């Protein structure tokens, strides 16, 4: 057993909120540099050049990568041998978000109907998972509204073929992708239930860029190839590079179900994590 105080969690969340506002997730810059070489459209090349320049300035000056610093989506993996002391985890996370967003845009409304801003970017969206071990892993994925709003889910019949799933994903990119600030990273959840597929799609975005899921690697390649043949291109203004990466997570599901969810992520993919 190992004790972890909620004050450590609060500070870690605060630091991650700050860092993620100005730092691209590991590997995104390499993908952007690769995209710059691959892009043939003049406008597309200019856009990617600006995106890279913007990211370099953000990192150097510690300034937000985008005006939309997002709603904080927090993934916490709690080792079952860790003992949390000093208070409640959720409270510590929200205090950390509040502290970490002090000088960032506050983008959360308390009630989706009345839409009154909470003024400290809380509450965060928190996903908790119990895992083996005695550590706590905290990941922060700030989600801008532009990309998040373009996301979609479809409940397929179990008779659907792989081609039907790909068609749905590619058609959704064509219809929605330009508003999500491409080049995109696509998180895709397949299986589970309606709600769980959406969770998987978001969770897929937390996978390290370049890390392979052996069960889905071929499907990811196929979808990336087809998405990049749509011609949507950087910022939807035409070109070869519509998406930088496709990440898929799957889960067992009911014999009659086949949910497929797409969570759009823009080029400002700012996921950061720490292990306590
Ligand atoms: S989709 Fe991303 S890059 Fe576009 S405005 Fe939102 S956070 Fe910024």
Image (cartoon, helix red, strand yellow):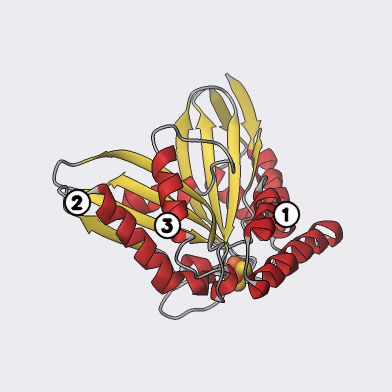
Query: Does dot 2 land on a helix, a strand or a loop?
Result: loop
Residue that numbered label 1 is attached to: 23
The residue beneath circle 2 is 160
What count of labels does the image hold? 3
Please state which of the two labelled residues, at mark 2 or mark 1, is closer to the viewer. 2
**Picture quadrant where residue 137 is located:** top right
Mark 2 crowdedness (10 Å alpha carbons): few <14, some 14-19, many ≥20: few
> For ligand 1, which image quadrant applies?
bottom right
- The image position of residue 153, as x and y in percent, is 32, 60
Q: Indicate the quadrant where residue 169 lies.
A: bottom left
Q: Residue furthest top?
A: 1
Quote the CA–CA distance across marks 2 and 1. Answer: 39 Å
Question: Residue drawn 54% across and 45% down?
Answer: 206
Residue nearest the observer in this picture, 244 or 252:
244
The residue that disc 3 covers is 226
Location of residue 228 with respect to 180 vertically, above or below: above
SS for tag 1? loop
Quadrant (top left, top right, bottom left, bottom right) of the C terminus: top right
Name the element at disc 3: helix
Camera-side residue of 48 and 92? 48
Percent coordinates x, y for residue 64 in the rendering: 74, 65
In the image, 30 versus 154, the foreground residue is 30
Q: Could one spot residue 104 in this view of the protein?
A: no
Where is the N terminus found, in terms of image quarters? top right
Going from N to C along the chain, the mark reached first, 3 or 1, is: 1
> Who's the residue at 48% across and 65% down the image?
148
Marks 1 and 3: in contact by CB < 8 Å?
no
């Amino acid at each position: 057993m190992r004790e972890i105080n909620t004050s450590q969690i609060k500070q870690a969340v605060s630091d991650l909120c700050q860092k993620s506002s100005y730092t691209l997730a590991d590997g995104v810059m390499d993908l952007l540099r690769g995209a710059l070489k691959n892009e043939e459209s003049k406008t597309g090349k200019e856009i990617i050049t600006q995106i890279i320049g913007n990211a370099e300035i953000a990192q150097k000056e510690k300034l937000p990568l985008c005006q939309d610093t997002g709603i904080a989506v927090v993934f916490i993996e709690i080792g079952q041998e860790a003992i949390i002391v000093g208070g409640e985890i959720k409270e510590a996370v929200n205090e950390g978000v509040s502290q970490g967003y002090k000088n960032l845009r506050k983008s959360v409304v308390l009630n989706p109907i009345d839409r009154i801003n909470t003024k400290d970017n809380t509450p965060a969206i928190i996903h908790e998972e119990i895992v083996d071990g005695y550590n706590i892993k905290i990941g922060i994925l700030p989600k801008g509204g532009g990309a998040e709003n373009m996301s979609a889910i479809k409940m397929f019949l179990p008779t659907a073929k792989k081609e039907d799933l790909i068609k749905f994903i590619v058609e959704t990119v064509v219809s929605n992708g330009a508003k999500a600030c491409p080049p995109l990273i696509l998180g895709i959840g397949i299986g589970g239930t309606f709600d769980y597929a959406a969770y998987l799609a978001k969770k897929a975005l937390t996978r390290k860029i370049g890390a392979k899921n052996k069960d889905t690697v071929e499907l990811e390649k196929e979808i990336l190839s087809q998405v990049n043949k749509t011609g949507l291109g950087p910022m939807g203004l035409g070109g070869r590079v519509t998406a930088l990466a496709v990440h898929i997570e799957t889960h067992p599901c009911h014999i009659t179900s086949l949910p497929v969810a797409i969570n759009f992520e823009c080029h400002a993919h700012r996921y950061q994590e720490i292990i306590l």
